[in-house]
Image (cartoon, helix red, strand yellow):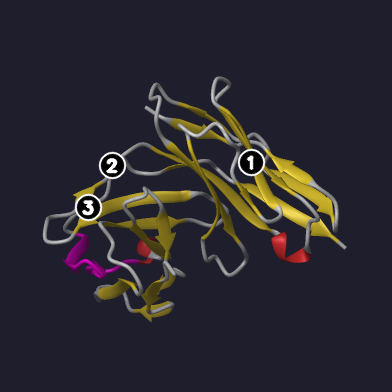
């Protein structure tokens, strides 16, 4: 149990385009979903926290207009990187939280902006 | 603010041997959760073990066990009978009720055949 999927696993796009990443909890309902960014050989950096039906809470320094988060249901959250630029290239990971304060992670999305 | 420290950037262990990864944290709370996550080269974060602070008994999951010292704010992970598949980055994490995770910087574990 506690499986989280993330799609796509890899995406290459041109500068200026928008990219949407989906995160789904497959066998449980997530009270909260989280979006992280991970640079090479570094720990996870929390970007935002979202609860179903409410606006996401962004961490300091994360542009909410740049990284749009929609949490449409208890099993689906999406992250849209708008007008992507090469500096947005990174590894993005979502996680879904349970009532037992545990987070289960998706497999991640590698974004490359040309 | 809570912080999590992993003082060993890299560790290595011989296959079938035992290794201990260190983690210390800082918090003023009395009730919280601690976790160890593993991130292999695939970069999928995998939950290894979980400890509730109010439980005195150390958590165990097969070959993985923790040494939770609440007063010292220490939460080390012991891997017994190490296997090649244990090679990964290991992250220690802390959370309080309803709060976000705080991750340590990670320890890269190599398993030598």
**Residue designated by label 2:** B98
Q: Which of B90 and A37 is in front in this view?
A: B90
Of circles 2 and 3, which is in front?
Answer: 2
Q: What residue did someone put label 3 on?
A: A63
> Picture quarter containing residue B73?
top right
Where does residue B32 sit, x and y in percent of width and height?
Answer: 41, 34
* Element class at badge 2: loop
SS at mark 1 in the image: strand
Q: Residue at x 61, y 51 (%)?
A: B90
Over which residues does the magenta segment extend? A66-85
Q: Mark 1 points at which residue?
A: B66
Q: Of marks 2 and 1, which one's residue comes earlier in the chain?
A: 1
Q: In which quarter of the image is residue A81?
A: bottom left
Q: Mark 1 lies on which chain?
A: B
**Residue at position x 35%, y 75% from top?**
A26
**Is residue A73 visible in this depiction of the protein?**
yes
The CA distance from mark 1 to mark 3 is 38 Å
Q: Nearer the viewer, residue B3 or A88?
A: B3
Crowding near the residue tagged with mark 3, few <14, some 14–19, many ≥20 C-alpha atoms within 10 Å: few
Q: Can residue A113 be seen in this view?
A: no
């Amino acid at each position: 149990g506690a499986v989280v999927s993330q799609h796509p696993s890899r995406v290459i796009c041109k500068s200026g385009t928008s990219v949407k990443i989906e995160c789904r909890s497959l066998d449980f309902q997530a009270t909260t979903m989280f979006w992280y960014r991970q640079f090479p050989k570094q720990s996870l950096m929390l970007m935002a926290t979202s609860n179903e039906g409410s606006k996401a809470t962004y961490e300091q320094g994360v542009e909410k207009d740049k990284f749009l988060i929609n949490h449409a249901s208890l099993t689906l959250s999406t992250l849209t990187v708008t007008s992507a630029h090469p500096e947005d290239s990174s590894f993005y990971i979502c996680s879904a939280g349970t009532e037992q304060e545990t987070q289960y992670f998706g497999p991640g999305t590698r974004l490359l902006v040309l | 603010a809570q912080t999590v420290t992993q003082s060993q950037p890299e560790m290595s262990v011989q296959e079938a041997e035992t290794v201990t990864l260190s983690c210390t944290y800082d918090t003023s709370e009395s009730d919280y959760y601690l976790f160890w996550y593993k991130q292999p080269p695939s970069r999928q974060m995998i939950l290894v073990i979980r400890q509730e602070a109010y439980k005195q008994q150390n958590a165990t999951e097969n070959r993985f066990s923790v040494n939770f010292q609440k007063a010292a704010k220490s939460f080390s992970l012991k891997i017994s009978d190490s296997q090649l598949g244990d090679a990964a980055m290991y992250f220690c994490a802390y959370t309080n009720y309803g709060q976000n995770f705080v991750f340590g910087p990670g320890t890269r574990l190599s398993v030598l055949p």
